[in-house]
Structures are given as structure tokens and as C-alpha cells.
Image: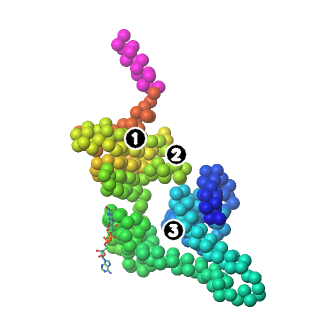
Amino acid sequence: MLPGKVPAAALAFLASRFLFRDLIQRRFGNKMGAIDAGEKKEGGFYLFTLRLVPAFPFFVINLLMGLTSMKTRTFYWVSQAGMLAGTVVYVNAGTQIAQISSPGGILSAKLIGSFVLLGIFPLLAKRIVDMVKARTVETNEYLQTLYPNIYACGDVAGPYQFTHTAAHQAWYASVNALFGDLKKFKADYSVIPWATFTDPEVARVGLNETEAREKGIAYELSVFDLKELDRAIADEEAHGLVKVLTVPGADKILGCTIVGEHAGDLIAEYVAAMRHGLGLNKILGTIHVYPTLAEANKYAAGVWKRDHAPQKLLAWVEKFHAWRRG
Ligand SMILES: Cc1cc2nc3c(=O)[nH]c(=O)nc-3n(C[C@H](O)[C@H](O)[C@H](O)COP(=O)(O)OP(=O)(O)OC[C@H]3O[C@@H](n4cnc5c(N)ncnc54)[C@H](O)[C@@H]3O)c2cc1C
């Protein structure tokens, strides 16, 4: 039963995201706030809880989740795990009932056990969920724990598990603890980069292509191949790329992924650009030392610029210079 259920749920999720957004918003809009807030705070974990303890009908969960920013892949696998656990318990109870052949069977240990399991399953699921949650301390957006004079940051606070996000949060926790009575600052997670230290390194910030597609966000792509970069060639590391996603028709960076030698270092320029609202024109207008790997960032901005060259103006300029040459 389950193998068909999850793809069907995923179809409903995708239809809601791409086809029936307005309709579903109108029909279930009142439930949307709670679902959206839960998904933002706890992501896949929130969906897992909903699947185990069905406070909402499954079809409503599928449709409403489609309107959140959850990835389709996450939706699929979390639904699979949550629905499998629930289905096992409910199917077991059903099977036991079907096997009753005499009035005495109603009192069989197996049947009573199945009903007990059915009854305690939501409580059990909630307990498991709470136990997993207990790995992090609950904080508000100012990083205050339930005891307002105690703050938490880093792995223990989540949601990220990086040294640089721990340091980022530490600023908010310290400043809010020291000056919170005068002014409090909400921890800002809008631009979080990370790197995977494989060979070659992979670094990213903001959206990547897969996420943009899954969230239905339109984007333009500018890619620079490191095989063309002098420093990468000299270092015998001429493989990898800088890939930048921008808002179609606008100089606004949505995200960047860099694969290559020292990608974790190179991404910093795009992190700074996104954090401070700078576009690719600004990166292109910045002098980069030759020959360095960092030039790749500028060349990726150059790819974007070439794709947005004012064709009509260039045609006019060409005619103008042809006329001047006589
Ligand atoms: C193998 C590995 C590789 C990683 N690589 C990277 C990476 O490349 N880049 C990256 O950004 N992140 C990486 N991380 C994650 C990174 O280490 C953590 O996100 C970061 O250390 C979190 O900092 P923190 O201060 O919150 O916790 P921690 O660095 O874990 O510090 C917590 C401290 O509290 C102490 N402590 C615990 N309990 C008590 C107690 N009861 N009383 C007193 N002291 C206590 C601990 O001993 C520890 O010193 C890696 C993690 C691992 C495990």
C-alpha cells in the first residue's frame, strides 16, 4: 500500500506547488500559518511529526506542504519514513481484527496488544520526537532559552552545525545578553555559506539550481569554467566551475556554487555580495589581482554581463564606428 501512497502524496505536493497554489491558499489558508511556521522552524522534522501523529488529514498535509519552501526530495523521504511507521501499526491492528473467528478471539492477547499499540502510538511517536528534539536547546529568535537570562548558540541551539554559524550566533547571544534590555537583535540566517572539504572543494551560498527548481523560483544561470583560468592552469588545478544564479533580468544574486581548488575561500566574495545586496556589476567592477583563483568570481560576473549586453546599443555603436572609419 505504501509504495503507491508516497508518490501520490508527492504528486499532490507538486500539484499544489505548481498548479493550484491560489485555490489551496483560499481553501485551507487558515491552516497555512501554523504549517508554514512549523516547517520554517523544524523543516523535515515537522513533517515527520505530522505524519506520525495525524492531527491533520494526510491530503491536507500534502497540499499545504506544497506551498511551503520544503524540497520535494525532503518531502518524499520524510513522508516515506513517517507513513511507513504509521501504516505498520494500523495495518497490524486491522490484520488482528480480520483474524477473529470466535467471540473468544476478541480477548486474545494479540488483539488486545494491537489495540494498546494503536492507542499509545501517537504518544510513543511524540515521545520519540521529543527525545530527538532534546538534542538541541529550544531558543527564540534572540537565542534566549526558556529561561530568558540564559542564552544558547552553536550546535546546541541549531539549526546549523557549523563553526562559523556558531560564531555568528555567539555575537547575537552575547550582545543580546549584555544589551537586550535596551535593544535586542534577531539572529539573521539569511545568508549562510558552507563548504565541503573534498578534492575539489565544493562551496555554496544561497540557492543552488536544484533548490530553485524545487521551490519554483525562476533564475538565470552564469557559469565560468575554471579550465580557462590562468592561475588554475598554472597550479595544475584547472577543473571546476563558478555557477551563479540570478533573478531573471535583474542584477540580484540568488546563490552561488563553486567547485574547485580553495572553493571555500573563493565563495567569501559572493557571501559578502549577497549579505550586502551587491550585484554582479559590482563584482565585475572590482579589481582582482592577476593571476589568482579569485579572478574566477569576476569572470563569472563577466559571463552574466555578456549575456545581458545591450544588443541594440552595440549594433548602433558598431554602425557608428564603421561610419567613422569611412
Ligand atoms: C568531525 C567533524 C568535522 C567538522 N568539520 C567542520 C568543518 O569543516 N566546518 C565547520 O564549520 N564545522 C565543522 N564541524 C562542526 C563544528 O565542529 C561544530 O559546528 C562547532 O564546533 C560547534 O561549536 P560549538 O561551540 O557549538 O560546540 P563545540 O565546539 O562542540 O563546543 C562545546 C564545548 O562544550 C564542552 N562541554 C560539553 N558539555 C559540557 C559540560 N557539561 N560542561 C562543560 N563543558 C561542556 C565540550 O567539551 C566542548 O568543548 C565538524 C564537526 C565534526 C564532528
**Residue drawn at (40%, 33%) of the image:** 306
Image quadrant in which you'd find residue 9: bottom right
The residue range painted magenta reads 312-326
**Residue drawn at (47%, 74%) of the image:** 133
Magenta: main secondary structure? helix
Amino acid type indicated by mark 1: Val
Mark number displayed over residue 45: 3
Q: Name the residue carrying label 2.
A: 218
Q: Position of residue 289 (x, y in %)?
A: 23, 41
* The residue carrying mark 3 has its beta carbon less than 8 Å from ligand 1: no
Amino acid type indicated by mark 3: Phe
**Which is more toward the observer, 42 or 149?**
42
- Nearer to us of marks 1 and 2 is 1
Element assignment for label 3: helix
Q: Quadrant of ligand 1?
A: bottom left
Q: Is residue 277 visible from the viewing direction of this image?
A: no
Mark number displayed over residue 223: 1
Element assignment for label 1: strand
Amino acid type indicated by mark 2: Ala
Query: Is 28 above or below relative to 223?
Result: below
Q: Is residue 249 visible from the viewing direction of this image?
A: yes
Mark number displayed over residue 320: none
